[in-house]
Amino acid sequence: MKPVLIQLRDILVSLKLTIVLLALSLLLVFAATLDQVNLGIWAVQEKYFHSFVIFGRLGNWAVPLFPGGYSIGGLLLGNLIAAHVYRFAFTWKKAGIIATHAGLILLLIGELLSGWWQQEYHMRIAVGQTKTYAESFRLNELAVMDVTDASYDDVVAIPESLLQHKTVVQHPKLPFRVVPKTYYPNAELAVRPADADDAGPAATRRATAGFGRQVAVAPVPMTDRPDERNQPAAIVEFVAADGSLGSYLVSTQFQAAQEFSYGGRTWRIALRSKRTYQPFALTLLKFSHDRYAGTDIPKNFSSRLHLRTPGGRDDRDVLISMNNPLRYGGLTFYQAGFENDDRTTILQVVRNPSWVIPYVACAMMTLGLAFHFAAHLFAFLRRRRTGRVVRATAPEVNPTRELTAV
């Protein structure tokens, strides 16, 4: 009987395993496509492709149902590498197919790195407006801003995850502690009734200062639909050495920041989309929404912007259109949409350090298949040409003479 390690190796290099994994990949893509109607593209990616196991609900229990994209892709990657190590011997005749498989391996690695490293943001810029930051689609942060100096804001950004886990934050730049009291992943706001009861346990979940004194908050189910967005809210208390500064209701639905004073300084707080600041500025000069003549059918969206760096290294105009992104500073800016009667452009901002890998992988597979096909074609032509020469030089046989000789 074979040792266990040898049996595992034989399974890993088996062509049957390759076929099973490819079949599971097709089923995974099919199920994710159907479920995208219910969950949306972001949730589908996380549930089906950026996971090791897909879980379902059985009452109050989470039950594993299907291997996720990381599991299938990892096994397929191991299967290809093991097959090359144990089954393929390098020869020039097999160079093409080996290059093709190497390209496929590189493509799987590139997808894994993209899932880990890729970050996506958006920039909303009105005509004439200048922005130096991009905002996350799904992540939020609590911004505590010192706005005493009119020339700049000193901002401390607290991740939403700390609010969710009720982690007390004491930052060196803040003369008080940030104490999360309640967190709602998705909340609904309404005007608070004048006769609301402020007594009992519910009073601890209400704000004592700021907008929250006139606003009531209630949790609502989270949504994963692509055309909807969760609106989180939290009640946060600020506690200084000499006592509490009040509890504030913060929400992404508030259009303005809340303000208070302490220690001779002016502070503002806001729960907002997570911002990523860049070492350059973009100013929207013009947004164009072209249509086909005589119709309202869109023909092209484009944004003409001015790119400027603080040091003056770059100071130029750039054009971003549907099929013409801007690549700058390790980021890619795509034309994603518009709003405000064509006065505001929406740019999708993507940071993906491994964006070159899929192009290299596809080039390797194309060249490998071309080389493999060309090698077999030339070998076939060579055999055919050699066969014609043999038939031309072979001695002619006279059937009549052979019968006479017999």
Image (spheres, helix red, strand yellow):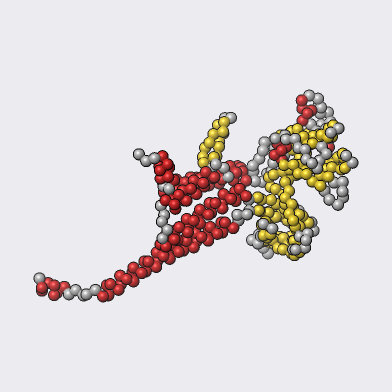
Q: How many marks?
A: 0
Q: Looking at this view, is 187 or 402 the one in front?
A: 402
Residue at position x 62%, y 46% in the image: 42
Could you tell whether 119 is left or right of 189 in the image? Answer: left
Quadrant hosting residue 185:
top right
In depth, the one of 101 and 258 nearer the eye is: 101
Residue 154 against residue 201 in the figure, above or below: below
Measuring 45% from the left and 64% from the top, which residue is drawn there?
371
| Residue at the (65%, 50%) spot, across then down | 119
x%, y% of residue 26?
Answer: 49, 47
User: Looking at the figure, which quarter contains the C terminus?
Assistant: bottom left
User: Would residue 93 be found to the left or right of residue 46 on screen?
Assistant: left
User: Split into 4 quadrants, where in the image is the N terminus?
Assistant: top left
Q: Is residue 30 visible?
A: no
Q: Residue at x 72, y 46 (%)?
A: 274
Q: Nearer the viewer, residue 290 or 23?
A: 23
> Measured from the top left, where is residue 27 in percent x and y?
50, 45
User: How far across and how far down the image is residue 216, in percent?
Assistant: 78, 34
Residue 191 against residue 227 in the figure, above or below: above
Residue 152 lies, with reference to residue 91, above or below; the image says above
Which residue of the protein is positioned furthest toward the top in this rendering? 200
Name the quadrant containing residue 289.
bottom right
Q: Which residue is most to the right?
A: 264
Residues 234 and 148: in front is 148
Q: Is residue 84 visible?
A: yes
Residue 353 position, x and y percent, is 63, 54
